[in-house]
Image: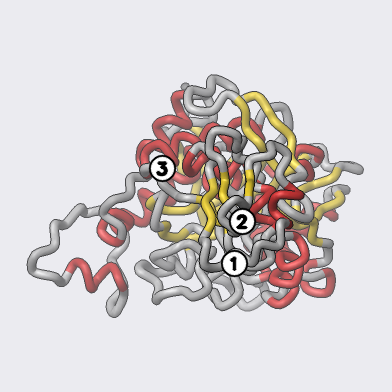
Amino acid sequence: MEKSKVVFTDFRTKLDVSQGVKLQNLCKKAGMDKIDFEGKFVAIKLHFGELGNFAYLRPNYVKAIADLVKSLGGKPFLTDCNTLYVGSRKNAVDHLLNADIDGFNYMTTGCHNIIADGLKGTDDIALPVPNGEYCKEAFVGRALYDADIIIVLSHFKGHELAGFGGAVKNLGMGGGSRAGKMQQHNEGKPYVHAELCRSCHRCAKECGSDAISFETGKAVINKDLCKGCGRCIGACAFDAIEADFDSVSEILGCKMAEYAAALAAGKPVFYVNLIMDVSPDCDCHGENDAPILPNLGMLASFDPIALDQACADLCLAADPLPNSQLTDHLNREDWHHHHDPFKDVHPNTSWRECLAHGEKIGLGTRQYDMEIMK
């Protein structure tokens, strides 16, 4: 496979050029303006940031992308799927409120927010996975499937399960519906916190498999009948039902790559990563620790594997920031140095398998030529 083109620029600007304009120029340099946007629905896939987290990408960067899409004739909307975990984004009502509070609304970005998998995370569609080994079908948010074009705008940072979160995770895990996220994490079997269950039977009414009973007075899920659709999680108003995140990092990464491949098949997809505010954990947390690495730059490509590999390589070559979780670990006398900032923050994670598997199934290549834009 030929090397893929990745375009890089740093965050330095001149007096007459804002970072937003520089981001637009980066996208055009990478070829985004060669896509036929005229009259097309364009999903800008991003992460709105969990309430309490301040590391997520500012709406200003999103507006720059949305304005560029509109200048090219497209009809952009911002989108993400509901979360599998209990938090401020587990249904569309809370999710949209979360987005609004964090600054993502029509006044700030110039386009509307649509939650891709609907009110309760069940508005999805099953797509075939090209060359899938772990997943033959991917359950993804319908609005992402319905979009004519997808722009994947990602905050590149650490992640406690995947090693780091970049383009592949944003589209693959982030594009999965609740059932899709369950398939990626643990083959889809939720469990009940009996002490939180109010015996309201709302979960049983939503269950399409008759898998929930109340023989003990509390909800009990029959794992043999459960299909892992996740409807019960969205239905419970008391956060009594949760998924068990038990997939190891390597398998999780491979499944994320397969989901990204399913969504990317048959339509133009363009990827942008911003390496800034590199928190050790995902933006799904209701807090964020100090950055572990400096703000390194903005990168864009049509190849998500090459893009994530280029970002990882820049991070591997960067000096750790003081007073961070990373330097806390590196300064310990008993610490085994992995010479990898993401493994040195979360030693049980492994991000390389995700990119290797994505390359294997044809999502992209880890080989790239980096073009630097001043």
Residue 29 seen in the current view: no
Mark 1 vs 3: CB contact within 8 A? no
* Label 1 neighbour load within 10 Å: few <14, some 14-19, many 20+: some
Q: Is residue 130 visible?
A: yes
CA–CA distance between discs 1 and 3?
20 Å
Element carrying mark 3: loop
Neighbour class for label 3 at 10 Å: few (<14), some, many (≥20)? some
**Disc ID at residue 83:** 2
Where 158 sits versus 355, above or below? below
How far apart marks 2 and 1 lie (CA) works out to: 8 Å
Q: Which residue is mark 1?
A: 87
Q: Secondary structure at mark 2?
A: loop
Q: Which residue is mark 3?
A: 247
Q: Position of residue 323 (x, y in %)?
A: 29, 79
Please, what is the three-letter code of the amino acid marked with disc 3?
Ser
Q: Earlier in the sequence, mark 1 or mark 3?
A: 1
Q: Is residue 287 left or right of residue 32?
A: left
> Is disc 2 in contact with disc 1, using a CB cutoff of under 8 Å?
yes
Horizontal side of residue 262 vs 185, given as left or right: right
Residue 270: give x, y in percent of width and height.
65, 43
Q: Residue 15 placed where, x, y %?
A: 62, 78
